[in-house]
Amino acid sequence: MKFRGLTKAPKLAVCDGALGFQNAVDEIWGQLKIQRCWFHKSTKGNGSSAASVAMAFKLCLQAEKNWRRLRGFKQLELVAKNIIFVDGEEKKAA
């Protein structure tokens, strides 16, 4: 975190229970108060691959209701070629 520019100790750090993160925070900012909150949820297996595909399909159907049509798709090739655009216009070489 310090390597990425964090100079002050965080007021709150949230992690997924990976103890490596907590150990790193303890090592760098040992004076922090630690509060652990564990929430356990168990399931019986991950389900079948068909169930996973069906769930992904349903999630995509729900998500696409908020999708917008991509305008300017013809410019994607130019962006891939590292051509710079400013305010939606191609920047001419100086």
Image: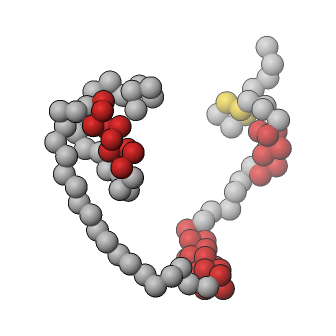
Number of marks drawn: 0
Q: Is residue 55 left or right of residue 30?
A: right
- Residue pushed farthest top? 94
Location of the N terminus (image quadrant):
top left
Q: Position of residue 44 (x, y in %)?
A: 46, 85
**Residue at 16% from the left image edge and 42% from the top image edge:** 33
Residue 60 visible? The answer is yes
77 above or below 51? above
Q: Position of residue 60 (x, y in %)?
A: 61, 74
Please identify the quarter of the rendering in which residue 52 is found.
bottom right
**Residue at 64% from the left image edge and 34% from the top image edge:** 87
Location of the C terminus (image quadrant):
top right
Residue 54 visible? The answer is no
Q: Is residue 3 left or right of residue 89?
A: left
Q: Is residue 24 left or right of residue 46?
A: left
Judging from the image, the colouring scheme is secondary structure
Please identify the quarter of the rendering in which residue 86 is found.
top right
78 above or below 47? above
**Frontmost residue, 1 versus 88:** 1
**Residue at 22% from the left image edge and 55% from the top image edge:** 36
**Frontmost residue, 36 versus 75:** 36
Q: Position of residue 19 (x, y in %)?
A: 36, 49
Q: Is residue 23 left or right of residue 92?
A: left
**Frontmost residue, 18 versus 8:** 18
Q: Position of residue 92 (x, y in %)?
A: 79, 23
**Frontmost residue, 42 versus 62:** 42
73 above or below 30? below
